[in-house]
Amino acid sequence: MKKALLLVVFLILAGLVLVNAQCGETPDNGVVLPPEPDNGNAVAPPDNGAGNNEIVQPSSSDYKVYANDLYGFNLEYPANWYLLGEADSTAIFFSSKDEEPPMGGVSLGARIEMFVLANDEGLTLDEWIEWSASEGPEKNIMQTEEITIAGVDAVKETHDPVPGPVEAGPAISVYFPLNSKIIRINYTGREPEYFNQLSNLNHLLETIQFQPAG
């Protein structure tokens, strides 16, 4: 009887030792530690190289997307236009024709110029536009409109055409603040390309979006 009882006790103790070995180590104080997690099958999140910025897709095959990662904005421009600018440029050019306008002249096609400009004094948009006008050549403003760009207050000015031997459309300038900068967009071109491509300027303005700056 005693032998049978000792055998049962032995089997119980052996079972406890086996369970402890499977569940974790037993330190000197007798506390059983949980087993180490097995991360061998853990899946790391995919790295698409885009950081926090999602890759923006154009609304249709008629357009491409330009994204400026440094200053934090993107927009759509016609797929058959020419782009001159990088993802960190302060001057970006979109042209309906692959050519540079003559010095002080007007492009043969329609041309959109986009500049990221300093506002170190922290001026309001109206103050900055007034200061900029005082620093440059005098321009005859035909019309001034208050518009919005991606929910931000902006100003659109229409000027007399650039003087010259060719017939050009009235120059358009759009201004809006972006963080500590001012964005200026210019639209110029010769007739009839100027009016034929004017809808592309409007589309570019309507598709501007802000994104986290780099």
Image (cartoon, rainbow, N blue to C red):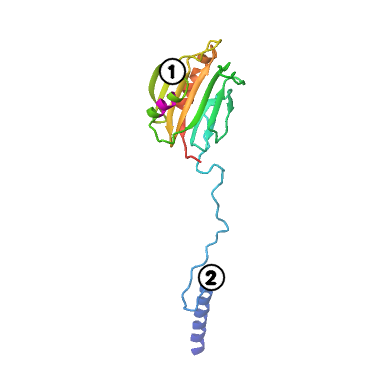
Q: Amino acid at mark 1?
A: Thr
* Residue closer to the observer: 211 or 146: 146
* Vertical comparison of 17 with 97: above or below: below
In magenta segment, residue 131: yes
* Residue that appears at 54% across and 41% down: 50
Q: Is the residue marked by circle 2 packed among few (<14), some (14-19), or many (20+) residues within 10 Å?
A: few
Q: Is residue 200 visible?
A: no
Outermost residue, bottom direction? 2
Q: Between 79 and 192, which is closer to the camera in this rendering?
A: 192
x%, y% of residue 168? 52, 13
| Label 1 CA crowd tier, 10 Å (few <14, some 14–19, many 20+) | some
- Place of residue 90 in the rendered image (x, y in percent of width and height, measured from the top left): 53, 32
Q: Main secondary structure of the magenta part?
A: helix
Q: Residue at x 48, y 71 (%)?
A: 33
Asked if residue 19 is positioned above or below residue 54 in the image, the reply reads below
Residue 121 lies within the magenta run = no
Residue 40 in the image: state x and y as whole percent: 58, 58
Residue at mark 2 to residue at mark 1: CA–CA distance: 79 Å
Q: Which mark is residue 8?
A: none
Q: Nearer the viewer, mark 2 or mark 1?
A: 1
Indicate the secondary structure of the residue bearing disc 1.
strand
The amino acid marked with disc number 2 is: Gln
What residue did someone put label 2 on?
22
Instruction: Please tell me the numbered disc located at residue 158.
Output: 1
Callout 2: SS = helix
Which numbered disc, 2 or 1, marks the residue that appears first in the sequence?
2
The residue stretch that appears in magenta: 128-133
Q: Position of residue 18 (x, y in %)?
A: 53, 74
How many numbered circles does the render carry? 2
